[in-house]
């Protein structure tokens, strides 16, 4: 059975991780919360709830529902101001086009809400009316829970057990393990090879271009 490919977005198909980091830094500073850039980077890709829980542990500040809402809004506004700098990662467009031409189903599942994901989808030329896209707005929990990937596979009418989850963070790989899909890690988001492997990655590639060169290793048939 041909696999279905379920892609994360930031750091997997689009070079946007550091724009998210800087947007979160600006949002946090707007709330007088001091958190180092490297600590923010380690949380990119996880759910907003886990993000704020870790903020509590690391900073000791009070994170009320009102403050969470303000942080999310500040982040979205700061991120959208960087829309003209968002670019597809090397090989991302070619990989998606190859899957389409080969009639291998694929979908996108992102922890981002549509207000920020729309910027990335536009950079890729992906129309959510044509390609299945599952965002944080549509599920109860985001990564490392598997809630994003399960409905993405369902929209492709594909068993999740035959799906390949492609992501750049340990949160993607942990979610893949939890829904019994194969996890493929990309180094383009800044996580290391050993980190991705220990989180459950079946194969690890540099970026989408490298993955396309080795697509037969993960079930793509040329």
Image (spheres, rainbow, N blue to C red):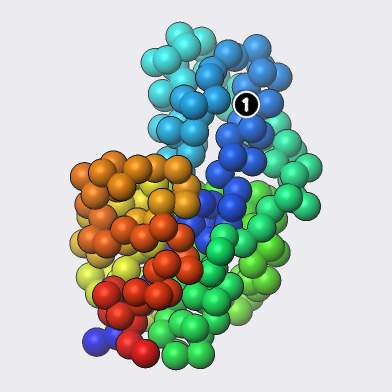
Q: How many marks?
A: 1
Q: Count neighbours of disc 1 (C-alpha within 10 A) and say few if under 14, some if 14 to 19, many if 20 or more.
A: many
> Residue drawn 53% across and 61% down?
13
Q: Quadrant of the N terminus?
A: bottom left
Quickly name the residue at label 1.
Answer: 25
Seen in the picture, residue 130 relative to 184 is either above or below; the reply is: below
In the rendered image, residue 130, in percent from the top left (x then y), is placed at 60, 79
**Residue 38, percent across and down?**
49, 26
Q: Position of residue 36 (x, y in %)?
A: 53, 19
Q: Quadrant of residue 67?
A: top right
Is residue 198 shown above or below 117?
A: above
- The residue most toward the top is 60
Residue 46 visible (yes or no): yes
Q: Residue at x 63, y 71 (%)?
A: 126
Q: In which quadrant of the rendered image does the C terminus lie?
A: bottom left
Please tell me which residue is depicted at 27% across the width and 75% down the height of the picture.
217
As helix, strand or loop, the secondary structure at mark 1 comes to helix
| Residue 165 image point, x, y percent | 35, 63
Vertical comparison of 5 with 29: above or below: below
Is residue 64 rendered to the left or right of residue 157?
right
Tell me if 93 is positioned left or right of 186 in this view: right
Residue 140 visible? The answer is no
The residue depicted at 66 percent of the width and 58 percent of the height is 87
Say which of 132 and 201 sits in front.
201
């Amino acid at each position: 059975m041909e696999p279905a490919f379920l892609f994360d977005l930031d750091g997997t198909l689009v070079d946007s991780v550091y724009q998210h980091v800087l947007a979160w830094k600006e949002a946090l500073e707007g709330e007088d919360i001091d958190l180092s850039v490297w600590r923010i980077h380690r949380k990119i890709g996880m759910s907003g709830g886990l993000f704020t829980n870790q903020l509590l542990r690391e900073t000791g500040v009070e994170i009320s529902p009102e403050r969470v809402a303000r942080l999310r809004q500040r982040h979205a506004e700061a991120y959208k101001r960087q829309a003209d700098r968002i670019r597809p990662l090397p090989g991302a467009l070619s990989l998606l086009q190859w899957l389409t031409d080969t009639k291998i189903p694929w979908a996108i599942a992102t922890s981002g809400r549509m207000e920020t994901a729309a910027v990335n989808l536009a950079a890729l030329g992906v129309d959510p009316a044509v390609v299945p896209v599952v965002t944080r707005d549509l599920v109860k929990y985001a990564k490392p829970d598997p809630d994003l990937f399960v409905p993405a596979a369902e929209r492709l009418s594909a068993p999740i057990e035959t799906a390949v989850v492609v992501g750049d963070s340990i949160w993607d790989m942990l979610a893949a393990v939890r829904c019994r899909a194969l996890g493929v890690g990309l180094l383009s988001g800044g996580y290391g090879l050993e980190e991705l492997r220990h989180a459950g990655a079946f194969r690890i590639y540099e970026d989408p271009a490298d993955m396309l060169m080795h697509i037969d290793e993960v079930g793509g048939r040329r």
